[in-house]
Image (cartoon, coloured by chain):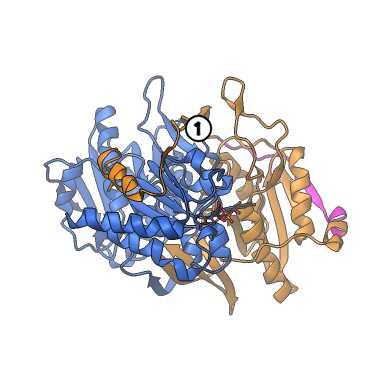
Chain colours: A orange, B blue
Amino acid sequence: MKILVCISKTPDTTAKIAFTDNNTKFASEGVQWIINPYDEWYALVRAIEMKEKDPTVQIQLVTVGGADADPIIRKALALGGDEAIRVDAEGQDSFFIASQIAGVAADGGFDLILTGKETIDHNGASIGGMVAELLDMDYVSLAVKLDMEQGKAVVTREIEGGEEICEAVLPLVVSCQKGMAEARIPNMRGIMAARSKPLKVVVPVPAASLTSIQSFELPLAKSGVKLISADHPEELVRLLHEEARII
Amino acid sequence: MSVLIFADQSEGHIRKSTYEALSYGAKVAELTGTVAEAIVLGPVLDSLSGLGKYGITKVHHVPDNGLEHMDARCYTAVIAEAVQQTGADTVIFSNNITGKAVAPRLSARLKAGLVAGAVSLPDLAGGFSVRRSVFSGKAYANVSIITPIRIITLNQNAYGIAESAGTAEVLNMTISSPASRLTFKSTSKVSGKVPLTEAEMVISGGRGLKGPEHWGLVEDLADLLGAATACSRAVADAHWRPHHEHVGQTGLAIAPNLYFAIGISGAIQHLAGVNRSKVIVVVNKDPEAPFFKAADYGIVGDAFEVMPKVIEAVRRLKAN
Ligand SMILES: Cc1cc2nc3c(=O)[nH]c(=O)nc-3n(C[C@H](O)[C@H](O)[C@H](O)COP(=O)(O)OP(=O)(O)OC[C@H]3O[C@@H](n4cnc5c(N)ncnc54)[C@H](O)[C@@H]3O)c2cc1C
C-alpha cells in the first residue's frame, strides 16, 4: 500500500503574529517553523503506525514550498516517512497548492492521501477536498480513526455533535485530527536515517490561483478586563445580565 | 445571477448554523443586487417555505434518500449541477463540518475561488473581497475572489441570524447524484447536548479544577444557561473530559457570545481557539494568569469558592 502524506510548514504555535510590507506579508523574521501539528501528529504518525503494522506500506511525503521547507521535510522523514517530494513553488492560494499535490499524486498510484484537518496559519481546511476533487477520489474529512480492513478503509469521522463510522474503497483522501494517533518525537536513529532518504525537488505544474490575499489585519485589542471582587461573584452575574446583556 | 445558499440538514431538520448562512446570503444578494435562493439535499421534516423568514425567495429541494449521509463527492456533484441550473454566481455554506468537506471540492470542480471561514460581508469596492479568520483566530486576511463564480463558507456566530416575515417558494429539483462509494456503518451522537461549535454560550474548565469529580461546577452553570461545555487541552489529555470538548489551536475553534473559563491559564494555544468569542469571562486564582488580558470580565479567586456563588446568583436570576 502506498500512502501520500501532505506536509505543510507553519509558524510555531507561540509565534508572534505580525505583518510587514503594508500588512501584506507575514513577518517571518525570527519565527520558528514547525510541521503543521495536524499534519505531523495525526496524518503522518497514523501513516507510520500503519507501516509498523504492515511493513509493505510505503510513505511518501509531499510539500509545496521553497528550500526553507527542507528542514521541516527532513524532520518528517526522521519521524518515519520513506521519501519526500518538494514542489518548488511558493504557495499562492489553496487551489494552487492542491493542484500541485494532485500533480504529484496523479501518477503515483497512491491508495491513501492523508492531510491534517487544517493548517494553523491559513486554517482553510481545503486542501484535502480539493485534491480529492481534482483526482476524482472519495474524501472523508475530520477523521478521528482510520484502519484498513480487507482492503477497505474504515474511518471514524466527526459529524456535528457526534461521530460516524464509514467504510470506503481505495483510493481515498482523508483529513486527520485529534484521536487519530499519539504524537511522537523523532529518535536519533530516525534523524540519522533521514539524512540519506530521498528528497526530490520538482518544478510546479501550471495551475491557476482563484483568490488573492489583499491584506492582513490584527484584531482590535480588548479594552481591558473589568475585575469583580471574589467576595461578590453575584456582581458578575448582574453585569453579564444588565451590561453585556448575554444571560 | 443569484446567491445560492446550502441549507444543511441533520435528520430532517435544518441546522441553526444554516439560518445564519441564509441570513448572510440574503444580505450578500441584497448587496450584489440579486436574489437569495437555498438548496436542501435529502429528505426533510421541516417546512422549507419557512426559510423565507431569512430572506430566501426560492428553495430548491433535492429530496433523494441517498443524500441522507454527507458524502462530499455526491454532494459536490449535485450542488455543482444546481449551480448550473440556477445560474448562481455566489455559493454560500456555513463553515461547519459539511461546509468544510464540500465547499473545497466544489471550488476545485467549478474553478470557483473559495473564501473559507469568512467573518464579514463582501467588500465590493473594486472587486469582491471577504475577510476571513487566519492564524487560528489571531489575525484576519482580506481575500479577493478573482473568478466568475465565488464560494464562501461563513464562520459560525460571525454574522448572526436576521429574521423577518416572508415565505419561500419550494421547488423540487431532480438531479441524480452519483452512487456513493461510502458505506455508513453507525452514527453516535452525544445526545441532548448543544454542539460546541453551534453553542451561543460555552462554559469551560481547565486544570485549575483539579479533577473530573469537580466538573459539576461547569455542568451546573451550563445547564442553567443552556450552554455547552468545553475544556483545555491539558484537561482532555489527562482524560478528565472527552477529546471532543477540547478547544484551542489544536482543538475546536469556537466563537460563542459568552465564553466562561474556569481555572484555565489562557495559554496562547488555548486563546487561539476562543478569542473570537464576544464576551470572555475568566475565573482564576492567579492574578497574573494570561487569560485576564484577553478577558472582558474577570474574578481573581478560588473557583471552588467563587463558582457556587455564581451558580446560585444565576439560579436566582433565572427564577425571576
Ligand atoms: C503545539 C501546541 C498546541 C496546543 N494546543 C492547545 C489547544 O488547542 N488548547 C489548549 O487548551 N491548549 C493547547 N496547548 C497547551 C497549552 O499550551 C496549555 O498547556 C494548556 O492550555 C493549559 O491548560 P490549563 O489552562 O487547563 O492548565 P494550566 O496551565 O495548568 O492552568 C491552570 C490554571 O488554573 C488556575 N487555578 C488553579 N487552581 C485554581 C483554583 N482553585 N481556582 C481558580 N483557578 C485555579 C491556575 O492559576 C492556572 O492559571 C497546546 C500546546 C502546544 C505546545
* Classed neighbour count for the residue bearing mark 1: other residues with Cα under 10 Å, few (<14), some (14–19), many (≥20): many
Q: Is residue A95 magenta?
A: no
Instruction: From this view, report whether residue A63 is shown above or below residue A158.
Output: above
Q: Position of residue A23 (x, y in %)?
A: 56, 24
Q: Can residue B15 be seen in the rendering of this structure?
A: no
Query: Closer to the camera, B215 or A90?
Result: B215
Q: Can residue B190 be seen in the rendering of this structure?
A: yes
Q: How many marks?
A: 1
**Picture quarter with the N terminus of chain B:** top left
Instruction: From this view, report whether residue A83 is shown above or below residue A1.
Output: above
Residue highlighted by disc 1: B141
Subunit ID for the residue under disc 1: B
Q: Quadrant of ligand 1?
A: bottom right
Residue at 72% over, 40% down: A32
Query: Closer to the camera, B157 or A165?
Result: B157
Residue at 75% over, 60% down: A185
* Magenta region, residue range: A193-208
Instruction: From this view, report whether residue A100 is shown above or below residue B44.
Output: above
Q: Amino acid at mark 1?
A: Ala
Question: In this rendering, would B267 be left or right of A61?
Answer: left
Q: Is residue A200 magenta?
A: yes
Q: Secondary structure at mark 1?
A: strand
Q: Position of residue A219 (x, y in %)?
A: 48, 32
Residue at 19% over, 58% down: B319
**Picture quarter with the C terminus of chain B:** bottom left
The quarter holding residue B55 reads top left
Q: Position of residue A100 (x, y in %)?
A: 63, 44
Query: Closer to the camera, A28 or B87?
Result: A28
